[in-house]
Amino acid sequence: MGNGSERLLRLSVSAAILAVPLPSAATSQPAQAGDHVTVRRAATPVEVFGANVLLGGLTAGTRALISGKDPFRAFAIGAFGGGVHVAGKHIAVAPGSVNGWLGLAVASTGTSIVSNAGRGVGPLQELSIPIAAARLRVTPRAHRKVRIAVNAFESGVLLHTLVRDGVQIDWRRTASSGAFVFLTEEKRIILDRDEVGGVASAPVIVIGAFSGDQSGTMRHETIHVLQQWFVQEAWGRPIEEFVRSKIPGARQIPDWLEVGVVAPSAIEIERWLTRGTGARRLQEAEAELFERR
């Protein structure tokens, strides 16, 4: 393939990622919904499944193409990983004390499959399981089979929430989810001048004291946490590893410490540019489907 054709293909695949036709969902009552964005109609499970499969395939295919790997093989395996990821989301919000952790394990396995496919290695070459601000990384075929990494950005979010006044940890939900869950103490959550039932910034979920449906809000925000973990692992981490390999002095940062700023920065920039009408609306569409289960 010529250089011009290859550049065009790369741009086409990248544009396709930004145009993934994720579904829309109906607006919830502000006091009941999670971090609320107005969307048009209720999503269906088929739409959400298809969107996750397509996103997994395009994510892996694009990364493989950029790094000179087989993009078609990566797309096929990444699409499978996207299906596994969304299956984990269904499990994570199902009733049961162990389903939160089981869903997290399945969803993160799907994310790992997408990431591995983009690298051009075996689907289970590395399994990455997020636990709060840490990552448990398992490489079955390596000499060092298990290691732990810490995400600096997510650690900062967690520490900031821990020292804030007016919130307390919900130990029951925290113990069953893999994220840190907080409840406000007689305080309302206002986001973009609207009252919302909860907010999520991986690995932290905050549920408002006046949420009309705390269980539904918890399901909603759990999906946002899994979404953000996917973005960080499948997109943010590869970019940061590339940057660290190119910036003088960055290699001195220990391997167990991951900065973790690329994905949240990209999410905030996109939100600012589109005023919440782009990816943010699509994330809400999926979260609202699971909220209504």
Image (spheres, helix red, strand yellow):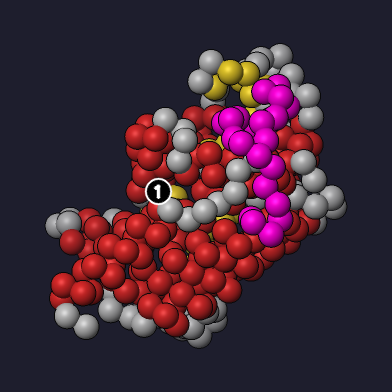
Mark yes or no: residue 167 visible: no
Residue 51 versus residue 237: which sits nearer the camera? 51
Out of 164 and 220, give the one closest to the viewer.
220
Instruction: Identify the residue at image location x=80%, y=45%.
Output: 293
Give the residues in magenta: 26-48
Q: Is residue 128 left or right of residue 168?
A: left
- Residue type highlighted by circle 1: Ala
Disc 1: which residue: 263
Report the number of discs: 1
Q: x and y percent of residue 159 in the render?
A: 50, 34
**Residue 282 appears in the picture as rendered:** yes
Asked if 70 appears above or below 118 in the picture, the reply is below
Q: Could you classify mark 1 by the number of other residues whose Cα lies within 10 Å: few (under 14), some (14-19), or many (20 or more)?
A: many
Q: Is residue 30 magenta?
A: yes
* Residue farthest to the right, as pictured: 96
- Residue 274, given in percent of the width and then of the height, sits at 39, 35
- Residue 178 in percent (x, y) is at 65, 50
